[in-house]
Amino acid sequence: MQFSLRYFLNGTKIKVMAEQLQIELEPAKIVALDALATQSGRRREELVAQALDDFLALEQQNSDAIREGLDDLAAGRIVPHEDVLPTIQAMRRPV
């Protein structure tokens, strides 16, 4: 699968080629991808690129949140478990 990005700058079309990447998919995933491509009017490559962009953004958010938590821990900005537990238990009780 080859990905290319197309940009328009002052009416001029600029095509930027990215590295080629091959992936193996189970037949059911290919069928689902093709169905979504048909339904959305987008190409397979666009859908895969969007899914990868979304995945990478989510993984970065997770990594940033973990780093922030570890930094808070190292700096002593924490609340002990026994102080938080009663609040959480109260939230779980039916009203």
Image: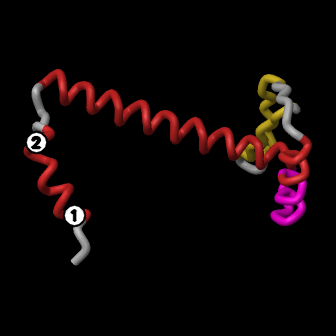
Q: Is residue 81 above or below residue 36?
A: above
Coordinates of residue 92 in the picture (x, y in percent): 25, 63
Which element type, helix, strand or loop, lies under badge 1?
A: helix
User: Which quarter shows the C terminus?
Assistant: bottom left
Q: Are marks 2 and 1 in contact (CB under 8 Å)?
A: no
Relative to 12, 93 lies left or right: left
Relative to 12, 91 lies left or right: left
Relative to 54, 24 lies left or right: right
Give the residue drawn at x 10%, y 27%: 76
The kind of residue on which mark 2 rests is Glu
Q: Is residue 41 magenta?
A: yes
Relative to 94, 27 lies left or right: right
The kind of residue on which mark 1 rests is Met
Q: Which residue is mark 1?
A: 91
Q: Callout 2 environment at 10 Å: few (<14), some (14 to 19), or many (20+)?
A: few
Main secondary structure type of the part rendered in magenta: helix
Q: Where are the magenta residues, as a range?
A: 33-43
Q: How many marks?
A: 2
Give the residue drawn at x 85%, y 30%: 24
Which element type, helix, strand or loop, lies under badge 2?
A: helix
Q: Is residue 46 magenta?
A: no
Q: Which residue is mark 2?
A: 82
Coordinates of residue 52 in the picture (x, y in percent): 67, 39
